[in-house]
Image (cartoon, helix red, strand yellow):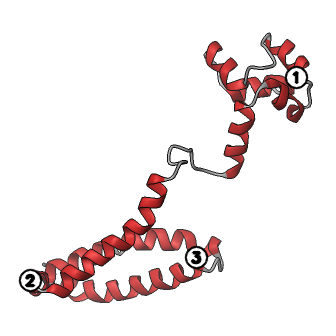
Amino acid sequence: MPAILNRYATPFITGLFLVSLISGIALFFHWGSAWFHGMHEWLSMVLIVPFVLHIWKNWRPMTTYFKRAPMGLALALSVVAALAFVLPAATSSQSGARGGPPQFAIAQALFDAPLSEAAPVLGLSGTDAAAKLDADVTQSLTEIASARESSAATLAQQLMGQPQ
């Protein structure tokens, strides 16, 4: 390993860990999220490089850690802690639900509702919307779009009189 990498791997781990620690605490408490979000994500990714260099530099001493119970216990507890967050999300009834911004969920609910319920949100009666689309008021925009090989958003734009 080149001497410069050898000399700076551990100090960079320390510096980047402190940045990650402070930005992580700020994000947890919702302090200055706009400042800290990108910093935390990107510099935590950069932290991988000096971490790998540190492991490389100290490989022999590291192998002795793996022969002792504390390392195995710490790694096992870390995996269990991670699973405590992953399993509830993976097994929830909404695991197939689409994530993303709430406005996307609202739009999808609108697109999946029957025209009789969705049309008033778009400023029309159910019968007017059905007439414009030559569809039934019991059909949803998603169903109509699927049959026409279009998108529900395009149909909603048509109903609102907006150009596509």
Left or right: where 8 falls relative to 1: right
Q: Badge 3 is on which residue?
A: 27
Does dot 3 land on a helix, a strand or a loop? Answer: helix
Category of crowding for the residue at label 1, using alpha-carbon neighbours closer than 10 angstroms: few (below 14), some (14–19), many (at least 20): many
- Three-letter amino acid code of the residue under disc 3: Leu
* The image quarter in which residue 122 lies: top right
- Three-letter amino acid code of the residue under disc 2: Lys
- Three-letter amino acid code of the residue under disc 1: Gly
Please determine whether, in this image, residue 119 is positioned above or below residue 104: above
Does dot 2 land on a helix, a strand or a loop? Answer: loop
Residue that protrudes farthest toward the top in the picture: 134
Left or right: where 88 falls relative to 108: left
Category of crowding for the residue at label 3, using alpha-carbon neighbours closer than 10 angstroms: few (below 14), some (14–19), many (at least 20): some
Q: Badge 2 is on which residue?
A: 67
Q: Which of 20 and 50 is in front in this view?
A: 20
Res. 54 visible in picture: no
Q: Badge 1 is on which residue?
A: 126
Please determine whether, in this image, residue 120 is positioned above or below residue 16: above
**Which numbered disc, 2 or 3, marks the residue that appears first in the sequence?**
3
**Which numbered disc, 1 or 3, marks the residue that appears first in the sequence?**
3
